[in-house]
Amino acid sequence: MIDLTPPPPPTAAQLRADAQRLHRVLIGVALFIVGLAALWWAEHQFSLDLRAFSIHPRSPEFLVGVLTAPLLHGSLEHLLGNSFGLFILGALTLYRYPQGSRIALPLIWLVAGLGTWLIGRSSFHIGASGVTHGLMFFVFVSGLIRRDRTSIAAAFMAFMFFGGMLLTVLPREPGVSWEYHLSGAVGGVLAAVLLRKRDPAPPRRKYSWEIEEELEREAERLRAETELPSPEQITPIWDGPTRPHDPRTDPRRGIVIVFPSRERGSDERLH
């Protein structure tokens, strides 16, 4: 039996909780970007040499850069470009996938760094672009896999703002780490596939035509279960003798069980 009752509209308390959650997400992403800006300012203000915290492919002493390289940026333009992507994509990921993002973010971070360390050119790789590419591919592929309305809306927004990331995973500019982009994209796709059932789709109200279609399908199912079959479709329990009938040797067409008649006794009384 199907449930045709549409879910109730969100209550005022639910709307307030969603607004508060969005508020916390935006503040959290903004504080992370402020931290990146503070680190960039301190690096340039005090002439700090932080190359030891970058990724230098296939150098064991630079493995720590897998964790720290996304925090470093070479210029203000580099920082601003990644900050915009982190703010939009980070907010979409944390708000739409609150449970999955707890695993997706560390997974994207690690896969982007390790992939760059394995396949990158012999240079210093820094910046959060690998993470932003991973978030974009995570949101976009999640929308394609899950196909509920909110996931599709998030995927559409990610593609509208950052669809060009689909091309930046290939070599284009000499000074751009496409290896970091590609590794982050692989991490995002991997997270989307592994966590596709982590966050349930939110309930939605059904339209009148959807309810009518479900009622028609249910009525057809009931008719198919209760309608009697035609005589041609019925298999009889016994369809006569299986051997050919010869009236000269066997006058009977089947086996007849003869019940003996009861003899009336002399003491039987008739009424």
Image: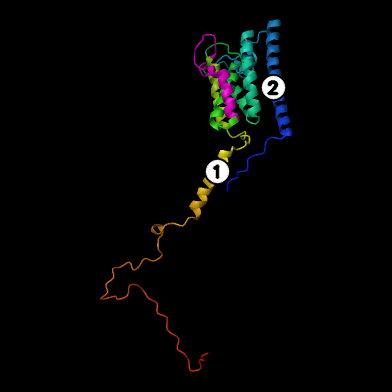
Instruction: Say whether disc 2 or disc 1 marks the residue closer to the N-terminus.
Output: 2
Q: Is residue 162 visible?
A: yes
* 86 with respect to 231 (left or right): right
Pick the front one: 192 or 257: 257
Q: Quadrant of residue 101?
A: top right
Q: Residue at x 63, y 24 (%)?
A: 92
Residue 135 point in image, percent of width and height: 59, 22
Name the spot of residue 65 as percent of width and height, x first: 62, 17
Q: Residues within 10 Å of mark 1 (few under 14, many from 20)?
A: some
Q: Residue extending furthest left?
A: 248
Task: Tell me what residue is drawn at x 61 percent, y 10 percent.
Answer: 78
- Location of mark 2 (residue): 26
151 part of magenta stretch = yes
Q: Give percent across and percent down for residue 241.
A: 33, 68
Q: What residue lies at 52% left-to-right and 45% top-to-bottom? A: 217
Identified at 58% across, 31% down, the residue is 149
Amino acid at dot 1: Glu
Q: Position of residue 264 (x, y in %)?
A: 46, 90
Check disc 1 and report the residue beneath it: 214
Q: Is residue 247 magenta?
A: no
Tell me which amino acid carries mark 2. Answer: Leu
For the residue pair 128 and 167, the one nearer the viewer reads as: 167
Report the magenta residues as a range.
150-177
Residue 67, quarter of picture: top right
- Between circles 2 and 1, the one closer to the viewer is 1
Q: How is the image coloured?
A: rainbow
Out of 60 and 132, give the one closest to the viewer.
132
Q: CA distance from mark 2 to mark 1?
A: 40 Å
Please determine whether, in this image, residue 230 is positioned above or below residue 166. Answer: below
**SS type, badge 1:** helix
Q: Which mark is residue 224?
A: none
